[in-house]
Amino acid sequence: MSLWLCIRFPQLALDCQPHPISYGNEDNHEQPVVVIEQQRVIAANAAAMAAGVKLGYSSASVRALIDDNTLLLLQRDPKQEQTTLERLQLWAYSISPTLEPWNNNCLQLEIGRCLRLYGSVESITQKAKLALTQRGFTTQMGAAYSRTGAWLMTFLADPEQALDSHTAVGQRAANLPISLINHDHREDHRQTVTRLQRAGIEQFHSLLALPPASLAKRCGTAFVRWLASLTAHHDQVSADYQLPTHFYDALWFGFDIRHTDELVPAISQLLNSLCQFLKNIQRETQCIEWQLLRAKGPPQCVSVRATGAYNNPARWQELTLLQLAQCTLADNVEGLALSVRDFQEPTTTVSDLFSLERTGEPRQALLDRLKNRLGLMAVQHIGLRDSHVPEHHHQSSTEFAPSSSDVTPPQQRPFWLMAEPQPVRQEQGQLFWNGPLTLRHGPERIEDNWWQRPISRDYYIATDAQGQPLWLFQDRHNRHWYVHGVMA
């Protein structure tokens, strides 16, 4: 048997737009904010309501009640409402995989299959209420065995009664006005509701007491089907929600951000949301992008990269704060967004339980901190290249690339290799370079690069007058001698 939890956002038109928020103290009064559509009020915050604003008022009436210097009048943004609802679906997936939008301002979650995990409906609703309150959303919740029933229960004044799925919907909705049917925008029953009200039927207990056959003759079969879906004890479960191919989530503060320390709570919340998303899709990421949202103008973007792919909010938060410490915040930053588009399959790292490396900082964590503090180009990785020529045997790169196991490090090589071989003077069979040289070991012949400029050298280890070992070679083409490096 399915059990549906409907989460209605009655103030979605207001909550989806950036606006000042109240901190609940006397020194910081909440600014009145009103959302209008076609010059009529469709949403208002508590400060505007306290000033006498009501839904349906004209914009002129609002201005007559509230001084223009303190009033914030916003136009409804349906596109922003839809985008916000899509982000909320992404959040709701952490509770149930079976969900869908409803009536443009609701989410329907099938929670019957989640009760064993969470224990009770109360546990699920408490988790949802806490998370959505932290995001700044006003919510109303209802539970029933059908979607329509759960939606109608969100209009009950008593939250406990709205979530009491063991009590029949008809009994709980008895005193609700039938005018609420007009709020279900999936079907238009306004004319039918008006005729019923003229007949003296104002509440659901009177409506549900009528015989279905009589209702069908008077109101039509479509209306009877709607009532049947309201009181149904089973609702067909829809397909599971399909996660998007990218992650995006945003939070608005309602005030200007002047220091990066003020971003820390929002960073933590968004990263937890991201890592829950990564856990759901069984992926990791190597790059995230922060967007500092401004009230006016384009956002300020900050990219954070790691040497490996991670699903660890603490690691990403540490790297984010290092990167933000190097940035100068733009003006009018009032929100923060997190965007991720590239995902990788998780990698399994096998380590020895008794390894000494477990007591120190992992190498990748150190590299990530250095790169985000000093810049990506400031940290270079040195590796071996498959070449016999000594000056071409090593390479450096900003990206870590493990050397092939087939490349064997050469033996008897100098600690310091000169950028350019230094010529050695030869007189009567004696080699001189800052004094006489004595050959100790060799030769070791190295030949390579035959397809471009052939190289053929005989390398020796020699010592100078102070006993310092040197690495020198004789070019077999011109018979000249050169010092190429200094031995340790």
Image: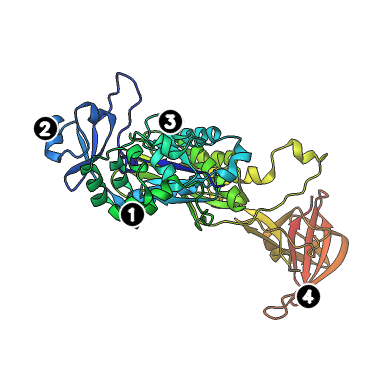
Label 3, label 4: how many angstroms apart (C-alpha)?
92 Å
Which of pointers 1 and 4 lies earlier in the amino acid sequence?
Answer: 1
Tag 2 secondary structure: helix
Residue drawn 42% across and 39% down? Answer: 170
Q: Residues within 10 Å of mark 1 (few under 14, many from 20)?
A: some
Which residue corresponds to mark 4? 476
Residue drawn 38% across and 48% down? Answer: 227
Vertical side of 109 occupied by 445: above or below? below
Tag 3 secondary structure: helix
Which residue corresponds to mark 1? 216
Q: Residue furthest top?
A: 26
Label 1, label 4: how many angstroms apart (C-alpha)?
105 Å
Residue drawn 35% across and 25% down? Answer: 23
Label 1, label 2: how many angstroms apart (C-alpha)?
47 Å
Which of pointers 2 and 3 lies earlier in the amino acid sequence?
Answer: 2
Tag 4 secondary structure: loop
What percent of the width, then of the height, locates residue 381? 65, 54
> Could you tell whether 122 is left or right of 39 in the image?
right
**Residue situated in front as seen by the camera: 250 or 414:** 250
**Residue situated in front as seen by the camera: 176 or 244:** 176
